[in-house]
Image (cartoon, helix red, strand yellow):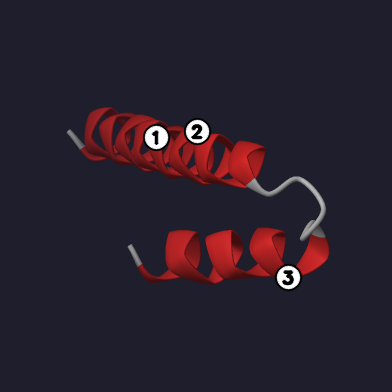
């Protein structure tokens, strides 16, 4: 989960004006990163076996 942390800090640095919306964006990006990682792992798993 290292890239998601970097991504959230990058978004907070890029968009300081959003304020409260930034928290929702951060959580959304975290969930999206988890889902993409899970999908990649599943595709890799099915590709190997």
User: What's the CA distance linking mark 1 and mark 3?
Assistant: 20 Å
Marks 1 & 2, CB-CB < 8 Å contact: yes
Q: For mark 1, give the secondary structure.
A: helix
Q: For mark 3, give the secondary structure.
A: helix
In the rendered structure, the answer to whether residue 24 lies left or right of residue 35 reads right
Residue lying farthest to the left in this orientation = 49
Disc 1 or 3, which lies upstream in sequence? 3
Compared to residue 20, the image places residue 17 above or below, namely: below
According to the image, label 1 marks what residue? 31
37, 19: nearer the viewer: 19
Identified at 68% across, 49% down, the residue is 19
| Residue 45 in picture, x, y percent from top left | 23, 36
**Quadrant in the picture for the N terminus:** bottom left
User: What's the CA distance linking mark 3 and mark 2?
Assistant: 17 Å
According to the image, label 2 marks what residue? 28
To which quarter of the image does residue 10 belong?
A: bottom right
In the rendered structure, the answer to whether residue 25 lies left or right of residue 45 reads right
Residue 13 is tagged as 3
| Residue 43 in picture, x, y percent from top left | 35, 30
Compared to residue 7, the image places residue 37 above or below, namely: above
**Quadrant in the picture for the C terminus:** top left
40, 16: nearer the viewer: 16
Camera-side mark, 1 or 3: 3
Q: How many marks?
A: 3
């Amino acid at each position: 989960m290292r890239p998601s942390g970097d991504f959230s800090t990058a978004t907070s640095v890029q968009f300081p004006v959003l304020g409260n919306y930034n928290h929702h964006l951060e959580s959304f990006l975290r969930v999206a990163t988890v889902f993409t990682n899970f999908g990649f792992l599943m595709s890799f798993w099915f590709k190997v076996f």
